[in-house]
Amino acid sequence: MQYKILLSFVLFFSFTQINIAQEESPIVGKWDLEITKDGEQLPSWLEIRVSGYKTLVGQFVYAFGSARPISHIKMKDGKYSFAIPNQWEKPDRDMEFEFQRIGNQLKGSMIYTDGKSYNWIGVAAPKLAPSKEPIWGAPRSLFNGENLEGWQATRENQWMAKDGILESKNSGSNLVTTEKFTDFKLHVEFKYPTDGNSGVYLRGRHEVQVADNQGDEPSSIKFGGIYGFITPNEMAARSAGEWQAFDITLVGQRVTVVANGKTIIHNQIIPGITGGALDSKEGMPGPIMLQGDHSPIAYRNIVITPAME
């Protein structure tokens, strides 16, 4: 009897300590970042959580690449710091971060792999939990099959419209809808060459990976994955050169992806923005973006069903 009482006390004390550690840390949570680098505002993202009693860990998304784990966030004199290895950046050195919470923001600096320091600001990411199931409007096409009306290139345009197909024959600019959306269902068909790589960005912030990965094990950075965050439950990619299809539902932060008729992601929460996002304003409506800066790619039958306000 005494043993059971002692065990209950130890468990209660342990859980209480964990809760206290989580509540006392002013930086725990998900943060939408903007890094000011060479006159540009680079959208980024940071998650901080407690491991065990008090160790702070997390993950970070830069302006490109996938989510990167943070093994330890240190605190000294009211300031926090961490370092992460480079991913696609050059030269080969760590990225170093130092920051503090000021009011309702995180403010800090990043020493990039080039050794230069850049400032950044983070605001708490919104929780986009829907209060009720959406009422869907009428489906409509985002591509008229003849020209780029309703779309704009992020840089110099290489996209062409012909015979119902929207095609980028070489690596170049991404393509973005001029209209923005909140919750929606999206049908899109695509075809890539061998080793092709593209992506469909939801609200311009969350990439569903389009890539030549037939026969591979599923991964968050391969076909159908929410890049760097959510791994599909199976690899549903067909052969390069074949037309394929996604049917994607996005409600708040929850996403369902049906690839070539198979549900590969079901009602999963997207933690934050993915690399290559247009911005980090997660609480705002955003466009559909087609990635064209990796390889040739073709799209057709792009149909959206937006939720009614």
Image (tube, helix red, strand yellow):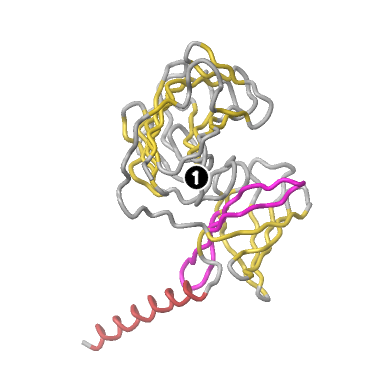
Q: Nearer the viewer, residue 117 or 139?
A: 139
Furthest residue to the top? 163
Quadrant housing the N terminus: bottom left
Residue at 69% in and 26% down: 156
How far across and down, in percent of the image, does residue 123 sit?
58, 60
Q: Residues within 10 Å of mark 1 (few under 14, many from 20)?
A: some
Q: Nearer the viewer, residue 204 or 11?
A: 204
How far across and down, in percent of the image, does residue 227 sit?
50, 40
Q: Is residue 10 above or below residue 295?
A: below
Is 44 inside the magenta-drawn segment?
A: yes
Residue at 57% in and 55% down: 32
Instruction: Provide the residue designation for mark 1.
Output: 285
| Predominant secondary structure, magenta span | strand
How far across and down, in percent of the image, does residue 153 sit?
62, 29
Q: Is residue 38 above or below residue 289?
A: below
- Region in magenta: 31-59
Q: Is residue 62 left or right of residue 205?
A: right
Quadrant housing the C terminus: top left
Is 113 inside the magenta-drawn segment?
A: no
Q: Is residue 194 left or right of residue 43?
A: left
Q: Nearer the viewer, residue 238 or 156?
A: 156
How far across and down, in percent of the image, does residue 281 sit?
55, 50
Q: Is residue 193 above or below residue 66?
A: above
